Image: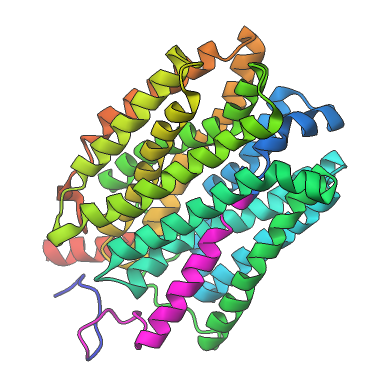
Amino acid sequence: MQGEPTQDDRGLPADEPATTRERLLLALGLVLVALSLRTTVTSLPPLAVEIRRDLGLSAAAIGLLTSLPVLCMALLGVVAHRLVGRWGREATTLAAIVCVAAGNGLRAAGDDVAVLFAATLLAGVGVAAGGVMLPGLVKAAFPRRFGAATAASSVAMLLGAAIAGALAVPLERLLGSWEASLGFWALPALPAVVAWTWLARRRDGSPAPVRAPASALPWRAPAAWLLGAFFALQSSLGYAYLAWLPAAYEDRGWTQATAGGLVGVLHLAQLVTALLLPLLATRRGGRDRRPALLGAAALTVTGAIWLFALPDALPWAATTVVGLGLGGGFSLTLLLIVDYARDAGASTGLAAMTFLVGYSVAALAPLAIGALHDGFGGYGVPFAALALLALAQLALATRLGPWYRGTVRQPAEASATAKSAAV
């Protein structure tokens, strides 16, 4: 039947790893790369006040610095998608994690504004490429256990984010400077470089099977636009709170270390729902992800309204509620990318488009919150805006139903199927 994924003599997709050993090695590689994909972003906000003071930056400039990796995820995911057809998934992922390691290492010399921005940009390029690779790798390697694989990669990513956020200030004190604290996060990326060097060599340079031009994205797929819009709201909330939650509570008289701990709580809470919701959503072959999506979005709404209306009433608990909602929303977005894509190639394209749409909007969130803070002189208006975004996300979750499963194809494949049907 035309348009169906090709299969080998075991009845499995042609690009699926042939042995259990290969699957285990790929699983390890996925976890290692996922661990380093958020350290660049989360290690900076707890140090933002000191960086701003030392370098003489405005609040908007600090927001832009935090947004750089997000901008990369928006704009460079398409480039990474294009490289898959030329280099293969493993080699592209290797290049991504090398950029993350090198960029984070260069931030150790970040006492110069230009160096700090350039190093963050380099790491952001790697973060962008690595993020686009993950759903396609999951779809190819674990087609029958993609819920568990999505949960594992999501938890690893969020765990790295939580650790980097929580240790930013302690590392600054231990190593003697915020530059060394930022540069430290090159070290955890090195095991991932070793693992993906081996995985890339295993391919002997041959690219992963891609049946459509790798530059093509599913622009005409309604599911892709809905998912991109949902992810735009999800990521805007996540990066805005990441960038400004510690600063908001420092303004309320908290110490830098205590306020930075909110970032750790935010991400530790995300681990719970990032692990559990994909597993629950795929339990017993369940097809409808909306109950889990609505639950996650409702938690985000509750926490966002709490932080806006009652900022001094148990803020640790409010941050935990927001984190539970954001973790579930993030991991379920990755699950829906795998869900809605017809095969691994389409999954990479759908991921690239989702990240392009989502992160293009989300990259503006820290900058917008900084501008609102500068304009209104406080965090009441900015946090009210975030509560409204959370309500919009809750409404959009009702639209992401099971009728979109397997509908997103690689554009060339979809065109060929349509011509065949017309004949």
Residue 387 position within the rendered picture, expressed as x and y whole percent measured from the top left: 41, 21
131 left or right, relative to 411:
right
281 is higher (above) or lower (below) than 208: above
Residue 214 image-quadrant placement: bottom left
Q: Residue at x 63, y 55 (%)?
A: 125
- Would residue 324 be counted in the magenta stretch? no
Residue 92 position within the rendered picture, expressed as x and y whole percent measured from the top left: 56, 69
Q: Examine the rendering and report whether any part of residue 357 can be seen.
A: no
Residue 32 position within the rendered picture, expressed as x and y whole percent measured from the top left: 54, 67
Taking the view exactly as shown, the residue that stands out farthest to the top is 376
260 is higher (above) or lower (below) than 3: above
Taking the view exactly as shown, the residue that stands out farthest to the bottom is 9
Name the quadrant of the C terminus.
bottom left
Q: Which residues are magenta?
A: 10-39
Q: Residue at x 39, y 26 (%)?
A: 303
Total numbered labels? 0
Query: Camera-side residue: 76 or 158?
Result: 158
Query: Camera-side residue: 292 or 359?
Result: 292
Residue 115 position within the rendered picture, expressed as x and y whole percent measured from the top left: 83, 47
Query: Camera-side residue: 285 or 422?
Result: 285
Q: Residue at x 51, y 60 (%)?
A: 34
Name the quadrant of the N terminus.
bottom left
Residue 126 image-quadrant placement: bottom right
Q: Examine the rendering and report whether any part of residue 398 can be seen.
A: yes
Q: Residue at x 50, y 72 (%)?
A: 29
Query: Camera-side residue: 76 or 382?
Result: 382
Q: How is the image coloured?
A: rainbow
